[in-house]
Image (spheres, rainbow, N blue to C red):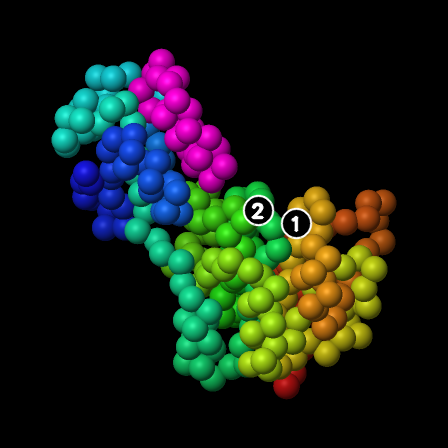
Amino acid sequence: MQENLNDENTYRIEGRHSVLEAFRAEKLIERLYVQKGSHDGPVLSILKEAKKNGTMVDFVPKERLDKMSETGRHQGVIANLSAFRYSTIEDMFALAKEKDEAPFFFLLDGIEDPHNLGAIIRTANLAGAHGVIIPKRRSVGLTATVVKASAGAIHYTPVARVTNLVAVMENLKDDGMWFACADMEGELMYQLNLTGSIGLVIGNEGHGISRLVREHCDYAASIPMSGNIDSLNASVAAGVLAYEIVRQRSFL
């Protein structure tokens, strides 16, 4: 069962089975309301999914759920869902064509922090990128935290979620795209040609880019650093490299 809320981008579902299936179908659940004291198997499964997806959880009295419920059969669980939907890579190419620009995509290899993903989507929008591609596994999806951290950029920047990032890169290479990844051991970013159809690859916050993804990159770009630590936050690195791409593209 679902109930439309005042926000046209949000609706509500009730019941344990409905909420669990929504998680498994990768719906964007913005907020989860769970009855205080509920700790049985189905509820624990829902809470596990909520933790994995970075969903905000409120434990509330049964009386509050009763007031929220339209069906009267909430079973101790109600969820608010966002109507945001993942885009396709075709949508990104269409946006580039509409702007009469060479395609510029971000590809994120295992970003797990929703704040980082939201910040990267925001940077992608401001840098004029035509979309962001994320993998389905070992990566945060479009959670409510991501939406908030994007500061509205999610409304304008397509985000596609793919099963196999390497396979997508191979297909995009066939379409003439080149890939540059962030790598501390790579060539100084100023010395690389980052113009034309380009994909910027950013790796996991802790482990960096996976071996297979790295092997499919054409360039390894390093950022000049002179401080006492040897790495940047993933979203900051994405911003620095993105604006080197912007700088080079603006002088075409």
CA distance separating discs 2 and 1: 9 Å
In the rendered image, is residue 113 in sight?
yes
Q: Residue 68 placed where, x, y %?
A: 20, 28
Instruction: Let me know if residue 41 is in the magenta part.
Output: yes
Provide the secondary structure element on which disc 2 rests.
loop
Foreground residue, 13 or 4? 13
Q: Is residue 240 above or below residue 91?
A: above
Q: Is residue 252 above or below residue 248?
A: below
Question: In the displayed structure, does residue 139 sit left or right of residue 216?
Answer: left
Kindly indicate the quadrant of the structure image that contains residue 192.
Answer: bottom right
Residue at 65%, 83% in the rendered image: 251
- Residue 138: mark in rendering: 2
Question: In the displayed structure, does residue 169 sit left or right of residue 91?
Answer: right
Foreground residue, 133 or 117? 133
Kindly indicate the quadrant of the structure image that contains residue 105.
Answer: bottom right
- Which residue bears the numbered disc 1? 204
Q: Earlier in the sequence, mark 2 or mark 1?
A: 2
Q: Quadrant of the N terminus?
A: top left
Span colored in magenta: 34-57
